[in-house]
Image (cartoon, rainbow, N blue to C red):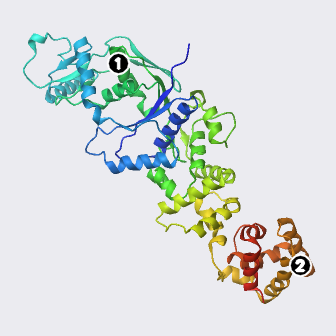
Amino acid sequence: MAQPEVVTRFAPSPTGALHIGGARTALFNWLFARGRGGKFLLRIEDTDRARSTPENTAAILDGLTWLALDWDGEPVSQAAGAARHAEVAQELLARGAAYKCFSTQEEIEAFREQARAEGRSTLFRSPWRDADPATHPNAPYVIRIKAPREGETVVDDQVQGRVTLKAAELDDMVLLRSDGSPVYMLAVVVDDHDMGVTHIIRGDDHLTNAFRQKLIYDAMGWDLPVMAHIPLIFGPDGKKLSKRHGATGAAEYRAMGYPAAGMRNYLTRLGWSHGDDEFFTDAQAREWFDLGGIGKSPSRFDTKKLENLCGQQLAIADDAALLQELEDFLAATGAPALSEPEREALGAAVPVAKQGAKLLPQVLEKAQFALVSRPLEPDEKAQKALDPVSRGILAELTPQLQDASWSRSDLEEVVKAVAEAHGLGLGKLAAPLRAALAGRATSPSVFDMMMVLGRDESLARIADQAA
């Protein structure tokens, strides 16, 4: 018998930008679905009309797009399904699984005050739960679900294990407000059921919600999706990740130039493990990711580890894809678009500029040698390397380089021979060479630059600075 298709979802509230914790939740859902040939759906939980904005929704979509977490179909608006949510509340009422409650806010507060005074639970127990409909007044009411009054509710969670909640701790939660609008807790269940969600992977701050949501699934006779509540992300100090720890939003990391592949690698590993593997490709992550590898303890965000993984991902990045990512980064920072010659020059420099870099600005910095035009104006540090003696050696080196076959090994041989003739180590000659080729004291290897620039441009730059 064929297994049902895996369907996961990411359901952010557009009351703010995409938090790094939300990005990881989306990534886990995406990996789980994509690794099993399933669907990854996106639902915008915009029922908080006062705080939900189109700008925040756009920012969330931009963050997911930056991380290359593609979703299936169009994003669903939760607010748009209000009529369907209310319909389910009415069906629960008709089934006898819910009831009309006419208690006023004042009556509910009076109940709680008395309970506090008597040392009892303040969970509201409505007098209307089993009331004869003939006694119902002509007054506003809410619709409440009938929670069990005995026993316990059980959720078998793929991360947290078997979790139980005693009936005494569950109230008859409101499903439909007195104005006829559905509550979030109802909307989530109806949407997940109607969207065919098979696995709910979300933060463990939603674990208590699972018990209340299960009441609706059971009352409607719907299959409960597989639940996996993942621990939150903490800062280095062991407290919940917040602004005091620095950047917390996906957009902030994008603006700083963190490569998306490095962020995916790091976030996948943050709270999930596959043996001792730290560095892996997207394909490996999709193949390996499973719910059993998620730990129960909160993970600590480590910027140093993130940057190390980013560096490893840049080193193996496809050069054409990285060039496009660099262009996207420049556009996001408001930099002018590259001309076609600049794009070609940057593309030629990418294979050497990416080595040793951890962030996109570092790649661009190392690629600057290919983007500058003659005559170069060496910076202060580079000027110091171009003393009269060094300029004289460059003048001597130029004709020998002209006669060399333009291969890295031949170029190294020529430069090494000239350096030795002057009693110098290769490094001593590399400094003025670097200053002449790049106009700065730090750059990729001089031989890498010469291979990228080619014979004519390299010799012209050296000649410009020679005595």
Quadrant assignment for the N terminus: top right
- Look at discs 1 and 2 and give the one toward the viewer: 2
> What residue do we see at 23% from left, 23% from top?
115
Q: Label 1: state its secondary structure.
A: helix
Can residue 248 be seen from the camera position used here? no
**Residue 13 pos. (x, y %):** 36, 41
Quadrant assignment for the C terminus: bottom right
Q: How many marks?
A: 2
The residue labelled by disc 2 is 418
Label 1 and label 2: CA atoms lie apart by: 82 Å
**Residue 295 pos. (x, y %):** 57, 32
The residue most toward the left is 138
Please indicate whether residue 440 sits to the left or right of residue 404 in the image: left
The residue labelled by disc 1 is 215
Please indicate whether residue 310 sits to the left or right of residue 54 in the image: right
> What residue do we see at 70% from left, 80% from top?
382
